[in-house]
Image: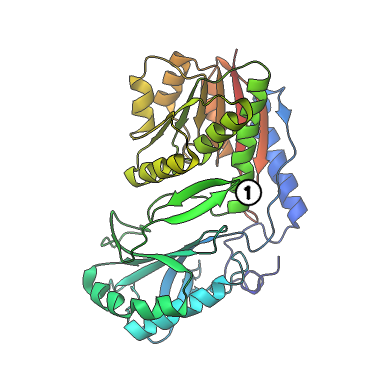
Amino acid sequence: MQCAHFMAGRCQSCQWLAQPYATQLANKQQQLVDVLAAFAPFQLLAPIASSEQGFRYKAKMVVLGTTDAPMLGIVNQQNEAVDLADCPLYPEHFADVFAAIKNFIVLAKLQPYQVQQRRGELKFILLSQSQHSGRFMLRFVLRSKNHLAVIQKYLPRLLAQVPAIAVVSINLQPQPAALLEGAEEIVLTAERLLREQLNQVPLYLSPQSFFQTNPSLAAALYDTAATWAVELQQQGEPFEQIWDLFCGVGGFGLHLASQLTAITGQQPTLTGIEIAAAAIASAEQAANELGLTQVRFQALDSAAFAHAAAQAPDLLVVNPPRRGLGDALCADITRLQPRFMLYSSCNVHSLAADIAQLKSYRLVKAQLFDLFAHSSHAEVLTLLVRR
């Protein structure tokens, strides 16, 4: 991938971009081997590569510049404002939407927030697109409601200019701290959810729900997890009960339940746990659309749910944040003793720390999915089996 910003030293967010992509992928695979060496032998599958550019369908842009000349990008390590509306990580058509958003900022006279002076209102622009439908979700992160009325007034012009924008909301983040978003969300459009579809599984995204930035690789990740589960069931390991902890909008659980049902004719009981109520509502909507009736999604803390449980599922699926499962949840997994675990991690070091605590399990196989090309990060899917 060629990037003028990287070559000029303006943006170093893609810290591995100077390496050929094949070298990046080989280095990540070797890191996986090194970090998980203590759990050998296990089957290490070939890594799943990303497209080198145009793969990010979610943008988080700092609003910089002035009301009359806004910029969307970052403040780099030299404290320089860098406009990244032409960043090659995004599909090319994102540039047209960014241009329309800049015109809207000028038209509505929205004041970019100035960190040092603590003045202004508009902090961030968050833009997501459904790869399946091409429709967008646009979020304005504001310091207060001072710009709410003017955004509502001129929003029809923006929607007329970019009809693909389906969902628009305002997020209020009043704190001067470096926080991307606040707790309060005000949806300004009739549509409140952005519908994505991966591998024929619908996924509904609310403004504050987490979703992977690389939908093509997310689809491969979910499909692989479901394939591994189907293979186990075909080997005589029936899954009557599945838990999906940290389930988000249901990506893993819905893929597993739908594929197992389609192939075996038996619908497993799926329990999905996620702290965010909006994500749970989205997962429930997708389950209803798929016709899955043996599904229960609950807005609970995953660790608290496991701690209160008395009986283990046949298959446990976990996709925790970067910090990993933690001591308490590992202890409860050890107590409950599910037969199989699918553990998806965006941090191989916390993954290794958790596997070391789960001494009653052995690592059977692992596969790297390069959701974050040109960086040191990757997603790793593992299968763990009770000894």
**Place of residue 148 in the rendered image (x, y in percent of width and height, measured from the top left):** 25, 72
The residue drawn where x is 60% and y is 23% is: 384
The residue drawn where x is 41% and y is 44% is: 285
The residue drawn where x is 37% and y is 61% is: 191
Q: Amino acid at mark 1?
A: Leu
The residue drawn where x is 50% and y is 79% is: 99
Name the quadrant of the N terminus.
Answer: bottom right
Kindly give the residue lying farthest to the top in the view shown: 387
- In the displayed structure, does residue 176 sit left or right of residue 348? left
Quarter assignment of residue 64: bottom left
**Place of residue 309 in the rendered image (x, y in percent of width and height, measured from the top left):** 36, 19
- Residue 81 higher or lower than 170, as above or below: below
Name the quadrant of the C terminus.
Answer: top right
- Residue 182 higher or lower than 310, as above or below: below
- In the displayed structure, does residue 43 sit left or right of residue 282? right
Q: Pick the residue in front: 293 or 19.
A: 293
Q: Pick the residue in front: 295 or 211.
A: 295
Give the residue at mark 1: 217
Numbered-mark total: 1
